[in-house]
Image (tube, rainbow, N blue to C red):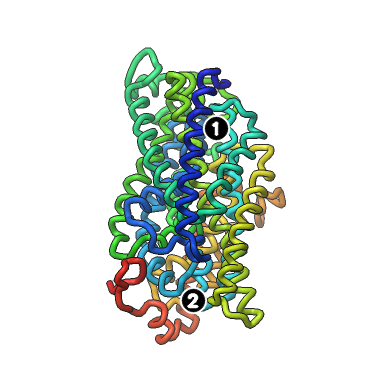
Amino acid sequence: MAATGAVVTYGWAFLVAYVVLILGLGYWGWKQTNSQDDYATARGGFGFLVLALAYATTVASGSTFLGIPGMAYDMGFKAGYYALIYPIGIYLGMMVVARITKKVGDRFNSQSVPDFLGDRYQSPLLRLLAALIALFLLFYIMAQIVSAGWMFDAILGVPYEVGIWLAGGLLLLYLVAGGSHADIITDAVQGAIMLAITALIVVMFVTGYGLDAGGMGAVNAQLDANQSWDTHTNYENPIFANWWVIFLLFVGHIGFTAQPHLGNKFFAIKGTQYIKKFMIIAAIVGMAMPLMFLGGVLGAAEGIDIADPDAIIPVLFIETMPAIVAAFLGVAILSAIISTADGIIISVAQIFANDLYRKTYVPWKGGDPDSPEVGQRALWISRVATVVVTIAAVAAVTVPPQYLSVFMWIGIGGIISAYSGPYFIGSIEESTSAKAALVGFVAGFSVYAIIHLGPQAGLYDSLLGFSLYPYSENPYASTGIGFIVSCLGTFGANRFTEPLPAAQVQEVFGRQEASTDGGREETE
C-alpha cells in the first residue's frame, strides 16, 4: 500500500528534522575527531549508557525492524524462535569477549577486530586474513541500504531505486566528518526511539489492535494453521526445518559479536570498570527490540496484503495509525536502519585504512605504522573509503533481494565461522597460539563455504551423495556449524602446537596501572 498524501507530507517534515539532527551530531563528531584512532574507535569517549544503547541498536539492524517482522508475516509465530533466540546467543557471546577486547585493544591501540586479533596473537597473517574476510560485511551494508530504500518508498513516496541513493547520502552527511563519534551518538539517540517503538508494537499485539475481537488469542485465531503459535517446525522451511537447526541458530549467534562493527564498540567505553553495566543494559535493550516480530504476526492476522513481506511494519503503521503518527514511526525506523549501516561502513573503511594500509602495507615497506604521517594518511583513507564503500553498497542493491535477514547472513556467516575460534577460545584460554588460531579460522570458514556458500552459488546441492539441505538454504544453521568447527579447531590445534610464549602472554594480557582519565586500561 502506498503512503497517503498526509503521511508523505508529515514524513518529509520529520525527515528534515532528522537531517538537521544528524548534521549537528556529525559536526560534534568532527570536533571530537583529531586522529585516525578517534575516527576508527572513539576510544574511551563514551559512558556505559550511551554505548549500550548504541550497541543494542547496531545489533538490531534493519533485519530486526523489517526483515524479521517480514519473516513473521510470512511464516507466523515460528519466526519468534529467531527473534527470541538470537539475542540470547549474541549477548552471551558479548559477555565472553567484551572485557578482554577492551583490555587488549586499548593496550595495543587496536582499531578493529581484525587488528585486535593480529595484536592478540602477534600475527600479521591472521590480521590480514581477518581483514579480507571482513569484506563480507558489504553484504550486511547492502541489506541495510535495502531496508532504508523500502522505508523511503513506504513512508515518503520515493521510489525504491531513488530511496537507496538518498539513504547513502544521509549516511555520508555525518560519517565522513564525524567517524565513530558521530556513529555512536546517533546510534544511541535512535536506540532510545526504537525501544519506544518496540513497546508500542508489543502493546498493539497484546491488545489485538485493529481486530474486531481483542487480545492475543484473536491474533492467533486469524492466522493460517501453519502460522499459528502451536506450529513449531516445518521441514519444507529450511530455517525452521527441525529442532536441531533451531538450536544451531542459537549457536551461530553466539559468534555474532565477533562482527567488526560490534567488536570495535568495546574500544569506545571509558574503561573496563564500566563493562559490566554496559553489558547488562545492552542485553536488556537488545533482547527487547526483537519483539518487533510481533508486528509481522499482527499484520498477517489483519489480512494486510503486500507484495514484499519486509515492508509489513511501515504498511501496518500506515493502515492502522493516524497519518502524523505513522510518518513519525516510519522515519524513526528509517533512522534506526541507518544507525546500523553507519557502524558497518566505518568498520569496512578501517579494513583499508588500518588493517591493510597502516598495519600491513606500511610495516611491509619498512615504515613506522605509528608515525604521525602514517596516521594522517590513514585518516584520509578512512574518509575516502567511507564514501567509496557507501556508493558501492547502494549500487549493488538496485534490485532488492528477498528476506533481508537471510541475505545479510551470506556475509555474516562467513565472518563468524572464521573469527569464532580465534576470538572466543583466545579470550578464554590465554595460551592459545597463533597457529591454533589460524587452524580454527581456516577450518570454520571452509566448512561454512562448503555447506552453504557453494550451494548458494549453484555449484552443487549434495556432497558425497548426501543432501546439504537444509544447510544449503539456512545460513544460521550453517554458521552454527562453522562456529563449532572454528572453536573446536582452535581448541584442538592448541593441544598440538607450541603455546604462546609466557613473555608474549604477559605482554598481551599482563596488568598495568589504571589511567587517571578512565579512557584506557585499568587493573582488574
| Picture residue at 30% right of the left edge, 52% below the top | 280
| Picture residue at 39% right of the left edge, 24% below the top | 220
The answer, for residue 470, to whether it is visible in the render is no
Q: Which residue is mark 2?
A: 121
Q: Residue 322: image x %, image y %?
A: 43, 18
Q: How many tags in the picture?
A: 2
Which picture quadrant has residue 348? bottom right
SS category of the residue bearing label 1: helix
Give the mark nearer the N terminus: 2 vs 1: 2
Residue nearest the observer in this picture, 404 or 61: 61
Q: Compute the Cα span from label 2 to label 1.
A: 43 Å
Quarter the C terminus occupies:
bottom left
| Picture residue at 49% right of the left edge, 71% below the top | 490
Instruction: Tell me if 203 is positioned left or right of 501 in this view.
Output: left
Q: Residue 104: image x %, image y %?
A: 41, 72
Instruction: Tell me if 51 is positioned left or right of 413 in this view.
Output: left
Image depth: mark 2 or mark 1 in front: 1
SS category of the residue bearing label 2: helix
Residue flagged by tag 2: what amino acid is it?
A: Tyr
